Image: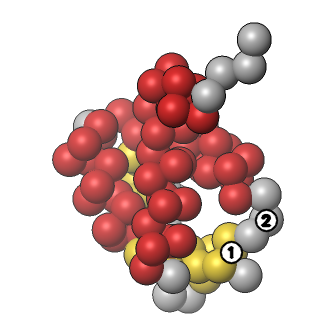
């Protein structure tokens, strides 16, 4: 029996829900700034999905980024100079 997308979303873990929110934001607004993503994740899911990287910047946890890459399948790119994601 195949599950509906809504049912799958209900069963998705926090990493998948965050990733889906990110894709939806980029779809709606054309880009997503890292600072906005970090603020959303912290306020809705807590600090366990955020860490400070070697450069001293807040970043999303590895499993969140993995789920995000799986969802967008190469259609979204990271602009490391501007600290945002956008459609390719």
Residue at image position (45%, 25%) is 10
Percent coordinates x, y for residue 72 in the rendering: 70, 58
Label 1 CA crowd tier, 10 Å (few <14, some 14–19, many 20+):
some
Identify the residue at image location x=72%, y=82%: 88
* Secondary-structure class at tag 2: loop
> Which residue is tagged 2?
74
Q: Position of residue 62 (x, y in %)?
A: 59, 42
Judging by the rendered image, the residue that carries numbered circle 1 is 77
Q: Closer to the camera, 81 or 12?
A: 12
Does dot 1 land on a helix, a strand or a loop? strand
Q: Nearest the camera: 67 or 7? A: 7
**Count of marks overlaid on the render:** 2
41 vs 59: above or below: above
Q: CA distance from mark 1 to mark 2?
A: 7 Å
Quadrant (top left/top right/bottom left/bottom right) for the N terminus? top right
Placement of 6 over or under 42, stated as above or below: above
Q: Looking at the rendering, which quadrant does residue 56 occupy?
A: bottom left
Q: Residue at x 68, y 74 (%)?
A: 77
Give neighbour class at mark 2: few <14, some 14-19, many 20+ (Cα, 10 Å). few
Q: Is residue 29 left or right of residue 67?
A: left
Q: Residue at x 66, y 21 (%)?
A: 3
């Amino acid at each position: 029996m195949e599950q509906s997308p809504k049912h799958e979303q209900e069963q998705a873990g926090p990493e998948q829900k965050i990733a889906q929110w990110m894709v939806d934001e980029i779809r709606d607004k054309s880009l997503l700034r890292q600072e906005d993503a970090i603020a959303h994740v912290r306020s809705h899911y807590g600090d366990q999905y955020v860490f400070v990287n070697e450069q001293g910047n807040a970043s999303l946890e590895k499993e969140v980024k993995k789920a995000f890459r799986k969802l967008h399948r190469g259609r979204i790119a990271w602009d490391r100079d501007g600290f945002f994601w956008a459609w390719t």
